[in-house]
């Protein structure tokens, strides 16, 4: 953190977590300098209470924003008069006091809230200064919450909350300083997040291209040879160094010698190319129509068949007679993100588990959400110990003709997702039956090329993931600096009154 000046003299604040504050600052109760107003909800069964002109805010709408001037739902005057909510003026602070406690925003218009929020109407406080002070006190506010079913910050606790009160001109100066510094910090973070989005798009493009067109040539030309009576695919690099990438095939599985000359020509395949049994093609020129609307052309040696040709599906399920004390690890659709990562696994006894916790999985299975598949809640199972997934997933079990990781990547391909969406039913939550999903067609290369594609994708995406990890660390460090700067300024640990705004 940049070195800033200190105030000339400090005194004990009397608050253990705060320590010393500038000598001329005060510690005051919030109720002395503001009004606290509650929120409430009109009856949802009365249509006359809803779709009016009065903004009505809920905690779900307060998330990483500074200002709020619109709401997802509005209430009528009758709805307002029917319950205990209160309209508050613009420049009020809206604080979430349950589910969760501590999110805060500044109103830019008159509005009211539901019971999950309380509104603070400042009387002799700079609104932005108080906003910044609340931003660093989330943990403290949660500690003041009470309740059994859910934690809630009550009126008494909020009204008697001690806040740090410099003279109002200093509050304004501190708020202006933080506005200026945080705008620069947030702009930096935004650019870094945009870069991560671009890198993720690049990663997705690499995967999509590889699983639909094959591995691209490493130096201009990738030779593919269908060698031998079994027609297995041979991949060689026809570049200047003649590097051998993968060799397979032959009438009886013998190793075929493949090498590339200086100009990329094929020099020898087991002595010669046998007419009728061997075909030389290039990655860039030998394609055929896939017959799949969303896909277009595919490499000549690939096969188009329904998904069920390569996998079985929903093979195993827990019976209703399962021991009620059986301990299971449950994966719901919401636990799988669009990158294919399983963010959370929740443990239950069978008797306490959701009724949809039924599908048994094994290592190597691929699970696909059959609801809103465009969100790509798709993952490969790496650890199957007592893992049960939602019936909202279809569980694909690879057969011997498809590589498990290739399957995991392939069903994320744009053309397959488009096909699933085109065959789904419903508007808000479009869904597809598992029996219908497995009839959709896939373009699949021979098993040896599947493995090469998986290896290529892993190599290329690992580079991108390392770059993303580095950027995320940068963002985390800047976020820490941002929080520390707010805390130092609003608690008087640094003096920013004469800050040069040109730095």
Image: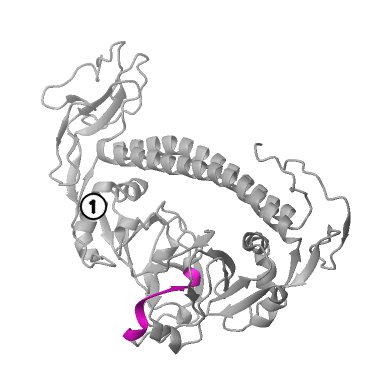
**Residue at image coords 82%, 48%:** 6
Disc 1 crowd rating (10 Å Cα; few below 14, some 14-19, many 20+) is some
Q: Is residue 392 magenta?
A: no
Residue holding disc 1: 418
Would you place residue 415 above or below residue 88 in this image?
above
**Residue at image coords 79%, 68%:** 27
Residue most extreme to the left: 276
Residue placed most toward the observer, 246 or 285 = 285
The image shows a total of numbered marks equal to: 1
Q: Is residue 489 left or right of residue 288?
A: right
Would you place residue 456 above or below residue 63 in this image?
above
**Residue at image coords 42%, 77%:** 354
Q: Is residue 494 left or right of residue 503?
A: right
* Image coloring type: one colour
First to last magenta residue range: 47-60
Residue placed most toward the observer, 220 or 178 = 178
**Residue at image coords 20%, 43%:** 295
Quadrant location, the C terminus: top right
Q: Is residue 48 magenta?
A: yes
Secondary structure found at label 1: helix
Does any portion of residue 254 appear in the rendered image? no
Residue 465 point in image, percent of width and height = 48, 41
């Amino acid at each position: 953190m940049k070195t800033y000046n200190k105030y000339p003299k400090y005194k004990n604040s009397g608050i253990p977590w705060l320590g010393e504050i500038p000598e001329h600052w005060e510690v005051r109760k919030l109720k002395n300098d503001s009004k606290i107003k509650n929120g409430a909800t009109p009856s949802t069964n009365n249509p006359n209470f809803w779709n009016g002109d009065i903004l009505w805010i809920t905690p779900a709408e307060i998330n990483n924003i500074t200002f709020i001037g619109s709401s997802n739902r509005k209430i009528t005057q009758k709805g307002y008069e029917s319950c205990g909510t209160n309209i508050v003026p613009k420049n009020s602070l809206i604080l979430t006091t349950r589910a969760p406690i501590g999110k805060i925003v500044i109103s830019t218009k008159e509005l009211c809230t539901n019971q999950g929020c309380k509104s603070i109407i400042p009387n002799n406080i700079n609104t932005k200064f108080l906003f910044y002070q609340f931003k660093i006190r989330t943990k403290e506010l949660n500690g003041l919450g009470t309740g059994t079913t859910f934690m809630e910050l009550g009126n008494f606790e909020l009204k008697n909350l001690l806040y740090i009160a410099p003279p109002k001109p200093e509050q304004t100066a501190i708020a202006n300083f933080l506005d200026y510094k945080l705008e620069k910090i947030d702009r930096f973070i935004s650019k870094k997040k945009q870069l991560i989005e671009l890198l993720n798009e690049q990663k997705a493009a690499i995967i999509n291209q590889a699983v639909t067109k094959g591995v691209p040539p490493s130096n201009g030309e990738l030779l593919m040879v269908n060698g031998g009576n079994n027609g297995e695919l041979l991949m060689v690099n026809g570049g200047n160094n003649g590097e051998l990438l993968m060799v397979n095939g032959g009438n009886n599985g013998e190793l075929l010698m493949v090498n590339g000359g200086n100009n990329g020509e094929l020099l020898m395949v087991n002595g010669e190319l046998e007419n009728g049994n061997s075909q030389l093609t290039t990655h860039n020129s030998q394609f055929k129509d896939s017959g799949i609307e969303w896909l277009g052309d595919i490499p000549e040696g690939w096969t188009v068949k329904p998904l069920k040709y390569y996998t079985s599906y929903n093979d195993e399920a827990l019976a209703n007679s399962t021991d009620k004390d059986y301990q299971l690890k449950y994966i719901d659709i919401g636990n799988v993100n669009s990158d294919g990562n399983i963010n959370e696994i929740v443990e239950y006894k069978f008797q306490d588990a959701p009724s949809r916790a039924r599908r048994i999985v094994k290592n190597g299975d691929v699970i696909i959400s059959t609801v809103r598949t465009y969100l790509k809640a798709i993952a490969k199972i790496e650890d199957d110990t007592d893992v049960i997934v939602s019936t909202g997933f279809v569980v694909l079990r690879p057969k011997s003709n498809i590589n498990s990781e290739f399957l995991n990547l392939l069903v994320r391909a744009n053309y397959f997702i488009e096909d699933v969406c085109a065959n789904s039913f419903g508007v808000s939550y479009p869904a597809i039956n598992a029996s219908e999903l497995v009839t959709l067609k896939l373009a699949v290369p021979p098993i040896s090329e599947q493995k090469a594609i998986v290896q290529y994708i892993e190599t290329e995406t690992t580079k991108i993931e390392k770059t993303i990890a580095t950027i995320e660390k940068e963002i985390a460090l800047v976020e820490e600096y941002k929080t520390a700067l707010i805390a130092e300024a609003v608690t008087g640990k640094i003096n920013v009154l004469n800050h040069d705004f040109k730095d």
